[in-house]
Amino acid sequence: ILNGLKWSEALNEAFTENQKNDPTLAWQYFGHDNGFMRVYPGSAWNQPNGQVDLYDARKRIWYIQGATSPKDVIIMVDASGSMRGVPMRIAKLSAMALIDTFEDNDFFNVISVSCYITSI
């Protein structure tokens, strides 16, 4: 993280120049793939004594949307006889967990596959 902080110091000049070129620009943010963040103009980060700062820019919606592109996904679920009971429940939970990671611009379809293919 320290190397990333040192490397990203060069952004201070770019942030300043951006604000000169556009005086209506209030805030600028940079999230690094290590999880740290730079904010311009800077401000004090209040952290209660004795508590660990768990802020991670990679978990913020603005970082995720900027770092990923829209996805088109097909999820195929085996619905054959061997998937009855617990295996099918696990497959459904896995598909739902994957779907929960999608954003507004992502598209998906779930297909059940056994002897026949069925769109769910």
Image (cartoon, grey):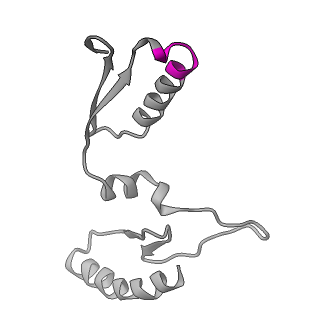
Residue 71 shown in magenta: no
The stretch of residues the image draws in magenta is 82-89
Q: Main secondary structure of the magenta part?
A: helix
* Left or right placement of residue 66 versus residue 43 in this view: left
Q: Nearer the viewer, residue 82 or 94?
A: 82
* Image x and y of residue 3, in percent: 48, 86
* Image x and y of residue 28, in percent: 36, 70
* Image x and y of residue 117, in percent: 25, 15
Image label count: 0
Q: Residue at x 25, y 51 (%)?
A: 69
Q: Residue at x 58, y 75 (%)?
A: 44
Q: Residue furthest right?
A: 50
Q: Residue furthest left?
A: 21
Q: Residue at x 74, y 67 (%)?
A: 48
- On-image quarter of the C terminus: top left
Question: On the image, which quarter does residue 8 sit in?
Answer: bottom left
Seen in the picture, residue 119 relative to 29 is either above or below; the reply is: above
* Image x and y of residue 71, in percent: 26, 42
Q: Residue at x 28, y 78 (%)?
A: 19
Seen in the picture, residue 59 relative to 76 is either above or below; the reply is: below
Q: Nearer the viewer, residue 12 or 52?
A: 52
Q: Nearer the viewer, residue 28 or 114?
A: 114
Q: Residue furthest front?
A: 82
Seen in the picture, residue 31 relative to 13 is either above or below; the reply is: above
Question: On the image, which quarter does residue 50 sit in?
Answer: bottom right
